[in-house]
Amino acid sequence: MQSFRRGGNAGCRQCLNTAEIAGALSGLIPNHGVGVVIEAQRLCMKMRGIQKQNRRTMTSALLGKFRDDSKTRLEFLTVIQPFNR
């Protein structure tokens, strides 16, 4: 999400989806924080015939405690680590 916030990759649908999901969840459970991680294959890469077609990209959005509290953030990132191949 850092590159999305800085304006890089602004058209990235995966980045937008990640931010939208985090925002929606945050609205449902206010005052707690939200961590969202999306890993996906990029169809746009496949359509263009890019050599590394099976490459997966990961985007994340951290809000509230997950962004502001380093202990909570570290715990979240540690828990999802086994899923990050």
Image (cartoon, rainbow, N blue to C red):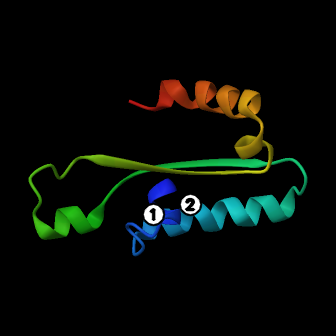
Q: Is residue 66 left or right of residue 57?
A: right
Of 50 and 3, the residue lying toward us: 3
Q: Amino acid at mark 1?
A: Gln
Question: In which quadrant of the rendered image does the C terminus lie?
Answer: top left
Element assignment for label 2 = helix
Percent across and percent down for residue 50 are 12, 59
Instruction: Determine the image quadrant of residue 66.
Output: top right
Residue named by callout 1? 14
Percent across and percent down for residue 30 are 89, 57
Q: CA distance from mark 1 to mark 2?
A: 6 Å
Q: Is residue 85 left or right of residue 26?
A: left
Q: Give yes or no for contact between labels 1 and 2 (Cβ–Cβ under 8 Å).
A: yes
Q: Is residue 15 left or right of residue 77?
A: left
Instruction: Determine the image quadrant of residue 12.
Output: bottom left
Residue at image point 53% right, 64% down? 5
Residue named by callout 2? 18
Taking 75 as reference, is 10 above or below it? below
Residue 72 appearing in the image: yes
Percent across and percent down for residue 4 are 48, 64
